[in-house]
Image (cartoon, helix red, strand yellow):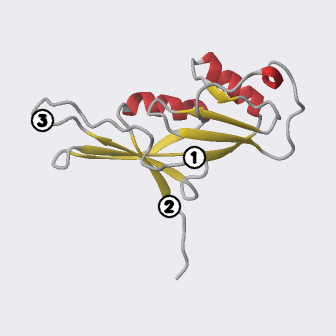
Amino acid sequence: MAIQYLHSMLRVTDPDATIRFFNLLGLEEVRRYDSEQGRFSLIFLAAPGQKDVAEVELTHNWPPEDGSAPEQYDGGRNFGHLAYSVDNIYDLCQKLMDAGVTINRPPRDGHMAFVRSPDNISVELLQSGENQPVQEPWASMENIGEW
């Protein structure tokens, strides 16, 4: 039996904020399933043309009906990171910064950067093909927080 990658699942507390974050990276919602009985939503995202290759499943457990506080997720339950290859790491990092996203590990080497989703999920961005030439302001930017 062959094995095939299907998706990575991330538990999220604010699906709208998380979808906006992944839209900035270029991912699009490809399907959604809402369960009234189970009180959860599954939202599947993929890069254009990659729906059958690699998806991210956002799982949102709805707040309890009794009005108590919803479950909070910190640290990702031993989740490492998602990784995406990008056409121009500098352009994407600038787009993310312009939208208020912190670049936790700037692309000082023209090759790799790390950012975090609104639920603190680490996302690695890797320059596709050859590294971009090292340039400012990226070359002298410090790491911020954890990545």
Extreme residue in the left direction: 66
Extreme residue in the bottom direction: 1
Residue type beneath disc 3? Glu
The C terminus lies in quadrant: top right
| Tag 3–tag 1 contact (CB < 8 Å) | no
Which circle's residue, 3 or 2, is located before the other in the chain?
Answer: 2
Q: Position of residue 96 (x, y in %)?
A: 62, 24
Residue type beneath disc 2? Leu
Residue at position x 61%, y 50% in the image: 49
Instruction: Give the camera-side residue of 64 and 104.
Output: 104
Q: Position of residue 84 (x, y in %)?
A: 65, 45
Residue at position x 45%, y 40% in the image: 75
Viewer-nearest of discs 2 and 1: 1
Q: Residue 20 vs residue 86: left or right?
A: left
Residue on which disc 2 sits: 6
Residue on which disc 1 sits: 82
Q: Position of residue 46 (x, y in %)?
A: 54, 47
Residue on which disc 3 sits: 65
- Within-10-Å neighbours for mark 3: few <14, some 14–19, many 20+: few
Q: Quadrant of residue 138?
A: top right
Q: Quadrant of residue 66?
A: top left
